[in-house]
Image: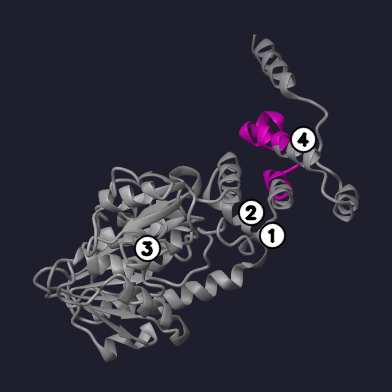
Amino acid sequence: DEMDEEGEEEEEGAEFADDFALPTEEEAAAEDERAPDTAMLQQRVQEVLRILVNFRERRQEGVDRADYVDRLARDLGKLHGYIPFLVHLFLDLFPPAEVIELMEANDKPRPMTIRVNTLKSRRKEVADALIARGVTLEPIDKWSKVGLVIFDSQVPIGATPEYLSGQYMLQSASSFLPCLALQPQEHEKVLDMCASPGGKTTYLAALMKNTGTLFSNDANAKRLKGLVGNIQRMGVRNTVVTNYDGRIYPNVLNGFDRVLLDAPCSGLGVISKDPSVRLQKDEGDISRCSALQKELILAAIDSVDANSKSGGVIVFSTCTITVEENEATVDYALRRRHVKLVDTGLEFGVPGFTRYRGKNFHPSLNLTRRYYPHIHNMDGFYVAKLVKLSNVKGPKP
């Protein structure tokens, strides 16, 4: 009886068996010399995916899973123009079939979005004015009251009278999210630590209805001109522009009710805007960004007053999808300062990782939110919202 069952199992496996084999080292080397054969690469990617789905049954004798994954990474890299390091990074984050969806989404531009400036206008008025100029548009989605998606336009969207008079800002949908998570209140003292070119700063000012004080900082003096230009065009009057390295900000100014840290990052969420990222970003870039972010997030926390009547809130965001620059940075802050994560208040997004490549993070990291081009049709993004529990520098007192 047992013999029969085993035989049946083998037959089932045989159904999938075919003559597909990974190329030998010599074949792979010869292939690298030639121009990529797209059809052959696509076919091989599908074959490898089929094997990985049911590895035990379909593998080639003596070939490890790692060999298949490595081949997949090389082939996808050639098809979509990435260095293998980045493909491996994606394969650590997503199942293989989803990596292909992400890469295909990165090949297409994201929809153009604008944010209506409620200090000067209302969404319906701006929409009507643009429609009259031959623009095809619709509201972004349920979650935003101020966003419009532009599908087609007879006029340059960045040069209409409405744009020039500050009734709207060209702004990616993903960068609305940290401002909504920060929820600045009227009459508060708020800091935007890495503010250029000013899309988030001017949104924060609008949410504050031009009251209170907003400090809009950027470490790069060259970027201040564009920042000031946008602040003036949008009719923002509650903002002070500063030019300090964010890491020393608490020594310059502190006691803020809320701080937004939209941190410098590797930019792996905005590959559709900047295709050069695919061939340039490497491990060094990611670890450099991650080290800088760890210093910045502590400075952001130290700038906030835990005894604020209305706030004591820090929002950390990036436009990248690596765990090293997102969850790992926030986890570091949780260990080094007396803060806790709270719900972002954003009604969509994928929960952050609490485990990654054998590392465990604080379980509350599932309160942070990730955004992906292939799922949300917006730039890859990350948002975490922290509340400061005491002004003691260091971990829990």
Residue 27 vs residue 152, the one in the foreground: 152
Q: Which residue is mark 3?
A: 161
User: Is the Cβ of the residue at disc 2 closer than 8 Å to that at disc 4?
Assistant: no
Q: Position of residue 23 (x, y in %)?
A: 84, 43
Q: Position of residue 380 (x, y in %)?
A: 47, 55
Q: CA distance from mark 2 to mark 3?
A: 44 Å
Along the polypeptide, which appears first: circle 3 or circle 4? 4
Q: Can the viewer see residue 343?
A: yes
Q: Crowding near pointer 3: few (<14 within 10 Å), some, many (20+)?
A: few
Is residue 136 shown left or right of residue 202?
right
Q: Can the viewer see residue 353?
A: no
Give the amino acid type for the residue marked by disc 2 in the picture: Val
- Under circle 2, the secondary element is helix
Mark on residue 67? none
User: Is the Cβ of the residue at disc 2 closer than 8 Å to that at disc 3?
Assistant: no
Region of the chain picked out in magenta, as a range: 46-71
